[in-house]
Image: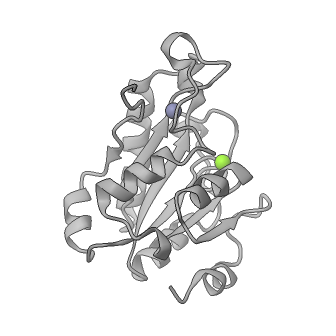
Amino acid sequence: MSMSLIRAPYLDPSADALLAGTASPRKALFLDRDGVININHGYVHTPANTDWVPGIFELVADAQARGHACIVVTNQAGIGRGMYDEAAFLAYTAWMHAQFAARGTPLLATYWCPHHPEEGLGDYRVACECRKPRPGMLLDAAARFDVDMRASWMIGDKATDLEAAAAAGVEQRHLLQDDAGIADLNRLFAAMAGR
Ligand SMILES: [Mg+2]
Ligand SMILES: [Zn+2]
């Protein structure tokens, strides 16, 4: 038996208040990061290289109004590949969370997997349980935050995002199919509502 490789999530400074404000078990909106929150320019890890996906702040606000806690789950093989380190990633993640908090729509937490099974350097080269499409990050979130996965949603831009969510028991899964962003919020929520 090996120790879990899953990293503790980055918790928003308001996490305790967010958790206190939602009934348990709670509904989550799980969000992939690159291609869902920020436009995927490739290994984004600086504010200067960050462009928001159109509609993302409205999406998070709407989900929160529906009682969902918003949790990011992101593969960050750029760490394992040596393109940026964990400290740089966490500093950037704190900045990203602050951007949401400043708009009144704080994210609860960001899960991140720094590994890659073939391209990782040193200890980062491992077939971990956290890298999507494996469900480790979502399962950890379910236990840590007491999430009702059947009442939760996942939005991703790759099939592997939705595979991870399906393996973790998230029933409502939506794939963003193009660069237009979250252009039709009403249709998205109509497809995912009623839960
Ligand atoms: Mg993505
Ligand atoms: Zn991992």
State the residue in front, 51 or 184.
Answer: 184
113 is higher (above) or lower (below) than 151: above
| Residue 139 in view (yes/no) | yes
173 is higher (above) or lower (below) than 33: below
Residue that appears at 30% across and 51% down: 12
Question: Within the image, what quadrant is residue 92 found in?
Answer: top left
Which part of the image, by quadrant, shows the N terminus?
Answer: top left
| Residue 108 in view (yes/no) | no
Residue at far front of view:
1
Residue 165 in the image, given as x and y percentages of width and height: 58, 58
Question: Within the image, what quadrant is residue 117 found in?
Answer: top right
Question: Within the image, what quadrant is residue 127 found in?
Answer: top right
Residue that appears at 26% across and 66% down: 18
76 is higher (above) or lower (below) than 36: above
Residue 170 in the image, given as x and y percentages of width and height: 54, 66
State the residue in front, 87 or 174.
Answer: 174
Q: Indicate left or right for 119 with 60 as reference.
A: right
Q: Indicate left or right for 16 with 98 as reference.
A: left
Residue that appears at 35% across and 60% down: 101
Coloring scheme of the render?
one colour
Residue 43 in the image, given as x and y percentages of width and height: 63, 32
